[in-house]
Image (tube, rainbow, N blue to C red):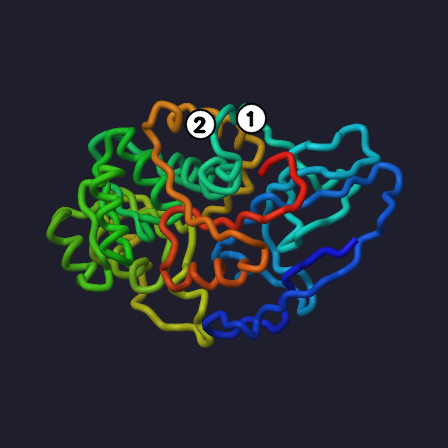
Amino acid sequence: MKAKKWILAKQFSGQAKDENFGLVEFDLPDELQPNEVLCQALYLSVDPYMRLFPNAEGNPMIGEQLAEVIKTKNGEYPIGSLVLANVGWQSHFISKGDNLTPIRFDIGSTPLSYTLGILGMPGATAYFGLKRCEPKPNEILCVTAAAGAVGSVVGQLAKNQGLKVIGFVGSEDKLKWCKDELGFDHVFNYKNTNFSEALSKVAPDGVDIYFDNTGGDYYHTIINKHMKKYGRILVCGSIQNYNDIETKKYDATNISILMKELSVYGFMVYSYYEKWPQAFTEMNKLIQEKKLKVKEQIYTGFDNMKEAFLGLFKGENTGKAVVKAVNVQTNYP
């Protein structure tokens, strides 16, 4: 059968461009071998990290998808089974089951696409990243990329735990969503605001927790100017630097970390993988109770993977960006 995949056509250097991607057709065997299953993508994730990790030209772009089994010779995975797989940007793939993960919690009536967002890697990042910072009621948390897949969840979880939340976003629509719908205490559009001056105004004594999704100027300035003594910094992402061709120089932070006795945590969410189902069960309950709100940017059609990915670096997405595959035959239209 014919399938499609998006490949890394050229290594990234600076801003991601059309020339970095190639959409190609390839053949999959019509007959499965023992223990094999044929899967087709239902939803595919696009995330900034996908350009960060090493990949060889010609290989599929890396990434996770939610897929359904459409043909099987594996008793563990009957036709219609839903599986999560880190197989990259492929419309179809064959597996022996060793790289497939069933949904590990009761999703109930929650949309299936959430397994790639708030009930997937980004949601786990928000949940365990915030927990790593040991938040306490009445503390002040600052989060960058506050309307994104991770930041929007971090802010809501923090509010649910009694913290004051300050967020930075990249558009007026995102500002309105975070402020009016998610209930963040202060939200600023960094494109028309001096973020350091804004932070000084609403948190003159500093912040207790900085959840860093952007790196760059934010990371260094907030550590040097805006942290309270014994503050905690969670290094989650650095989208401000992903497109850098040359390493930029910033003011040193070591003296500020020393004098204020700050704690800086590097964070990789897969270190908590075995605990994900517990987090998703808890967050799914909050979703059902309308204590966690979700917004998705859904692109329709596998051919739009590139457009969805490039949009991440243009600030197009509010919440989680996902691509919905359009399949002729599916149990999950």
Q: Which of the 4 image quarters holds residue 101?
A: top right
Whether residue 308 is visible: yes
Q: CA distance from mark 1 to mark 2?
A: 9 Å
Residue marked by disc 2: 284
Packing grade of label 2 (10 A; few <14, some 14-19, many >=20) is many
- The amino acid at mark 2 is Asn
Whether residue 264 is visible: no
Residue at position x 75%, y 61% in the image: 26
Q: Position of residue 170 (x, y in %)?
A: 28, 58
Q: Earlier in the sequence, mark 1 or mark 2?
A: 1
Q: Are marks 1 and 2 in contact (CB under 8 Å)?
A: yes
Q: Is residue 300 above or below residue 183?
A: below
Looking at the image, residue 160 sits to the left or right of residue 307; the answer is left
Q: Is residue 48 above or below residue 183?
A: below
Residue at position x 15%, y 47% in the image: 203
Q: Position of residue 235 (x, y in %)?
A: 40, 51
- The amino acid at mark 1 is Phe
Residue marked by disc 1: 105
Asked whether 191 or 219 is in front, the reply is 191
Assign a secondary structure to mark 1.
loop
